[in-house]
Image (cartoon, rainbow, N blue to C red):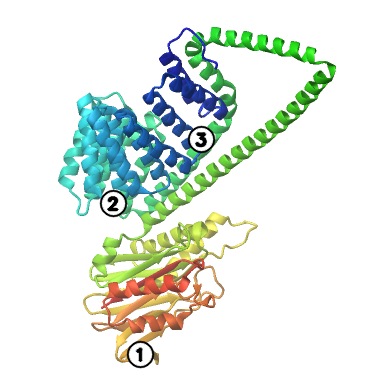
């Protein structure tokens, strides 16, 4: 043993546990060494509490290495041991750690079970700090499961503990979380949200803590956005922006920009919203760039100085061990000399055997060191790959949030197209398909568009096309669908030409979209329509007469297809004006507009494309059903058809019943 000194056994045990904890993230073998020393001391003292503490520390070592199965087995064993020996404090921490493992493997119900047990144990022991953490863990799980009432209940209990111990920072943060959740309830409780968030702000204003103050202001901004009090939202967001910028709070500043984007979107200021969206993307990339630069610059520092810092932190703790280690070295020297004497007595032959054995041992040790170095290098490379993948995933996820900001809210679709449905299934996180809507007076404009590509490239094109559609109506006051598509094409081509440069060696960008654009007059049920490569389907109970269009009948229901112009909204030669079509619809008629993703999906027993005929038959079979049932059956059929095959394209379908 290393610990042979005049220090008490408890002091030596505590020192060993501290050293093991210090080395977890630095040197796994060193951490294990000190943990074993602590276990030896605990066994010598026959102290159950110390043995339980060793297991709790071993959990941290295993959990850091993501050895989840071993962590679960260890904590179940520790829980039994603590119950047997009536170790209440250690039992609470064992429950809490087991809950943490279950969260990491996304078994939330199991995690909740053990966090509740931990909370009850800490409460019984009056361990307020630990109880507060377990309450926050329980609240977080309920939040992830969309059970906001229970989440609020447990966060309020956490707040009461913060209040009991006089932690104003914790009180402000807890009230901010609670207020935000009141906004997200169904239905929202805006009255309680407002009073709670202002109470959080009042506490934050009394602190010298910009981070907490900016978070409280961001929460109030979110509240005013949700209640559509956009002037107040702007006021509080500007305050948060100033504090975040002055104090260099990157995460808070990013949240302020997100709120600004949402405010502009709700105000219908899409041009400035696009500028802010680009600012957010640039800022996000800057953060990643700065963080990566810092990480690379600090790697050497971490390697060279972290050990020195660790050493400085441990100097006081290890001072009492200096004499112990010296005694140990002296004992080791004595045994070495004694051993050499025996070797000399045994003779030259035995000595030669010893030398050979030592040489082999060194070879094995060198090989072991090489293997360890290779393992460490592989681990470092894996961590770098994980980090880069996470950065890419985060950027794409953020692109999805930007794309979602330009799509019409589902509530708006439901309000203006009361008897209808939307199916929107991006192939990737972001989509090249998008749906669009604009309402003015008694007219509702709506469309399904399929942009060049899918994923991130398709999403980028969709932002340009969406903005061009909005400008065609808002800026140029166009009302006919053909004229709108003509102007949209002009704006899209102009936008890509400007971005590509007049003399670019890359030539003209051919990106654009296929689209089916409808304008429905809700007073007289007149429908105006124009299409670029995409058709429109009219489903009617009975005959539909329009320019010799023949329907596909199933019983008394017919599906009538009107084809769009064979050209995209984008650069194309020859480029012709888009054709207007006008239909007089009657009550019960159904409108279907869609991208090609549904019909192009591979699946079935032979792995072939679905194609349009089965799609039409499915709609006719369900034409008499309510629109929400039609949506459910379309989605179910698509998933069953796809089976284990990969989704090959974005899917978007809008159905409307007159």
Res. 554 mark: 1
Horizontally, is 44 left or right of 417 in the view? right
Residue under the image location 25 percent in, 82 percent down: 588
Horizontally, is 528 left or right of 171 in the view? right
645 lies above or below 260: below
Say which of 247 and 97 sits in front. 97
Say which of 539 and 564 sits in front. 539
Cβ–Cβ under 8 Å for marks 3 and 1:
no
Of circles 3 and 2, the one toward us is 2
655 lies above or below 431: below
Earlier residue among tags 1 and 2: 2
Res. 291 mark: 3
Cβ–Cβ under 8 Å for marks 1 and 2:
no
Q: Where is residue 448 in the image (x, y as percent from the top left)?
A: 40, 69
651 lies above or below 121: below
* Circle 2 Cα neighbour tier, 10 Å, few/some/many (<14 / 14–19 / ≥20): few
Residue hosting label 2: 146
Q: The C terminus appears in which quarter of the rendering?
A: bottom left
For the residues marked 3 and 2, what is the alpha-carbon distance in whole angstroms?
Answer: 33 Å
Residue under the image location 50 percent in, 28 percent down: 24
For the residues marked 1 and 2, what is the alpha-carbon distance in whole angstroms?
Answer: 43 Å
Say which of 350 and 64 sits in front. 350
Residue 213 appearing in the image: no
Q: What element carries label 2?
A: loop
Q: The N terminus appears in which quarter of the rendering?
A: top right
């Amino acid at each position: 043993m290393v610990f042979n000194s005049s220090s008490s056994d408890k002091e030596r045990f505590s020192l060993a546990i501290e050293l093991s904890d210090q080395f977890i993230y630095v040197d796994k073998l060193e951490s294990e060494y000190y943990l074993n020393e602590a276990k030896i001391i605990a066994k010598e003292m026959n102290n159950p509490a110390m043995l339980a503490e060793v297991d709790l520390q071993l959990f941290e070592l295993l959990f850091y290495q993501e050895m989840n199965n071993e962590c679960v087995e260890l904590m179940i064993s520790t829980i039994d041991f603590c119950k047997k020996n009536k170790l209440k404090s250690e039992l609470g921490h064992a429950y809490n750690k087991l809950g943490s493992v279950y969260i990491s493997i996304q078994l939330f119900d199991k995690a909740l079970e053990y966090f509740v047990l931990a909370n009850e144990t800490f409460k019984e022991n009056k361990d307020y700090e630990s109880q507060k953490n377990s309450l926050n863990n329980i609240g977080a799980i309920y939040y992830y499961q969309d059970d906001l009432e229970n989440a609020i209940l447990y966060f309020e209990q956490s707040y009461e503990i913060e209040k009991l111990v006089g932690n104003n920072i914790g009180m402000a943060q807890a009230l901010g979380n609670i207020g935000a959740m009141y906004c997200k309830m169904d239905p929202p409780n805006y009255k309680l949200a407002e009073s709670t968030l202002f109470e959080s702000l009042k506490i934050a204003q009394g602190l010298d803590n910009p981070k907490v103050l900016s978070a409280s202001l961001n929460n109030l901004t979110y509240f005013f956005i949700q209640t559509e009090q956009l002037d107040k939202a702007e006021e509080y967001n500007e305050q948060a922006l100033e504090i975040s910028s002055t104090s260099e709070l990157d995460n808070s500043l990013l949240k302020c920009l997100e709120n600004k984007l949402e405010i502009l979107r709700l105000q219908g200021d899409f041009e400035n919203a696009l500028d802010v969206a680009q600012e957010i993307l640039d800022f996000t990339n800057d953060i990643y760039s700065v963080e990566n630069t810092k990480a690379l610059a600090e790697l050497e520092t971490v390697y060279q100085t972290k050990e020195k810092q660790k050493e400085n932190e441990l100097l006081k703790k290890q001072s009492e061990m200096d004499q112990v280690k010296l005694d140990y070295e002296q004992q080791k020297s004595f045994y070495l000399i004694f051993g050499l004497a025996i070797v000399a007595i045994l003779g030259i032959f035995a000595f030669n055997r010893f030398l050979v054995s030592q040489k082999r041992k060194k070879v094995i040790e060198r090989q072991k060191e090489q293997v360890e170095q290779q393992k460490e290098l592989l681990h470092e490379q894996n961590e770098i790959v994980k980090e880069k993948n996470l950065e890419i995933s985060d950027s794409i996820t953020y692109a999805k949030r930007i794309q979602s900001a330009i799509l019409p809210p589902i509530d708006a679709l439901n309000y203006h197209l009361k008897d209808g449905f939307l199916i929107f299934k991006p192939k990737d996180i972001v989509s090249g398909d998008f749906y669009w809507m604009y309402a003015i007076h008694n007219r509702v404009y709506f469309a399904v568009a399929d942009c060049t590509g899918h994923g991130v490239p398709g999403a980028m094109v969709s932002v340009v096309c969406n903005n061009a559609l909005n400008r065609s109506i808002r800026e140029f006051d166009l009302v006919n669908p053909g004229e709108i598509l003509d102007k949209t094409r002009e704006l899209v081509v102009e936008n890509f030409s400007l971005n590509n440069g007049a003399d670019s060696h890359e030539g003209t960008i051919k990106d654009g979209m296929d689209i089916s654009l409808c304008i429905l007059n809700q007073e007289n049920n007149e429908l105006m329509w124009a299409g670029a490569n995409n058709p429109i389907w009219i489903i009617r109970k009975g005959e539909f007469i329009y320019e010799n269009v023949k329907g596909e009948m199933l019983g008394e229901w017919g599906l009538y297809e009107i084809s769009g112009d064979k050209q995209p909204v984008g650069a194309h030669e020859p480029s012709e004006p888009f054709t207007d079509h006008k239909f007089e619809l009657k009550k019960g008629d159904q409108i279907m507009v869609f991208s090609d993703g549904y019909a192009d999906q591979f699946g079935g027993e032979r792995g072939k494309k679905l194609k349009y005929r089965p799609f039409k038959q499915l709609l006719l079979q369900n034409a008499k059903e309510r629109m929400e049932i039609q949506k459910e059956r379309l989605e179910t059929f698509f998933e069953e058809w796809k089976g284990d095959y990969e989704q090959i394209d974005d899917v978007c379908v809008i159905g409307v019943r007159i």
